[in-house]
Each structure stands twice: as structure tokens, then as C-alpha cells.
Amino acid sequence: MAKITHVDIAGIDGGKLKSFYGDLFDWNITRRDIPTFDYYDIETEGELTAGIRHEPEGRAEITIYIEVDDVEAYVEKAKSLGVNIRIPPMQYGDLKFAVIEDPEKNPVGLTQAKSN
């Protein structure tokens, strides 16, 4: 069964979001070393559960990531259902991922562990 594994919170001012969520919920939020953009990891109860993306040219949105057994197959299925593919399947370290949009244009991330 596909399960939700991660949530990204994106906004024009990532630092402001980091401060807000950290102060509101006392979350441990740290900057990840990604040279091309600001990204912050959110830990809750000692586990990495979410992140904050700084999107200065983008828009505010929340993306859920769902773990599947075959990212390419799910992207093809999403295409057959008539939705937009925002980020085609790509490898990032040990994780393969893609981002599709639902019929209302909400982003939905798909992830697949390398061992799958």
C-alpha cells in the first residue's frame, strides 16, 4: 500500500517559515547543505518528518510525498488520468522521486527507495 512518508512546506520566505514553525511547535529545524536552494529539515520526535523549501520565485504550497514501489509506473498511471507531471522521475541519492499534480493542481510527490 502506498503510504505518506514526508511533507514539504514551501514559501517565498523559507527563513520566515522556519522561524514560524520552529517557534510555534518547538520543532528542531536545521538547514540542509544543498547549494542550489535553501532547504530545512524538520525533526519531530527525533525523526526527519518534513521539510521547508525556500521558493523565492514560486508560490506557497504544501506537498505530500507518498512512497510507492515503482515511481515510473505511477507517473505513467497519473499521465493516463490526465494530470500534469511537474517533476519527472529522477534519482536523488538513494531515493528516486517525481512530483505530479492532482486534478486541482496540488503537488503530490512520489518516492521510491533504491532497494525497490
Image (cartoon, rainbow, N blue to C red):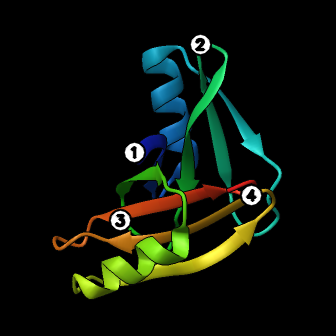
Task: Identify whether 56 is placed above or below 3.
Answer: below
Identify which residue is drawn at 16% across, 70% down: 104
Residue neighbourhood size for the residue with mark 2, other residues' Cα within 10 Å, grouped as few (<14), some (14–19), many (≥20) = few
Which amino acid, by three-letter code, is at mark 1? Answer: Met
- Which one is in front in this view, the residue at disc 1 or the one at disc 4? 1
Distance in Å between CA atoms under marks 4 and 2: 25 Å
Judging from the image, what secondary structure is the residue with disc 1 in?
loop
Residue 2 screen position, x and y as percent: 41, 48
Q: Is residue 61 left or right of residue 25?
A: left
Task: Identify whether 100 is placed above or below 65.
Answer: below
Q: Earlier in the sequence, mark 4 or mark 2?
A: 2
Dot 4 corresponds to which residue? 114
Dot 1 corresponds to which residue? 1
Q: Is residue 19 left or right of residue 74?
A: right
Which amino acid, by three-letter code, is at mark 2? Answer: Glu
Task: Identify whether 41 is placed above or below 71.
Answer: above
Distance in Å between CA atoms under marks 3 and 1: 20 Å
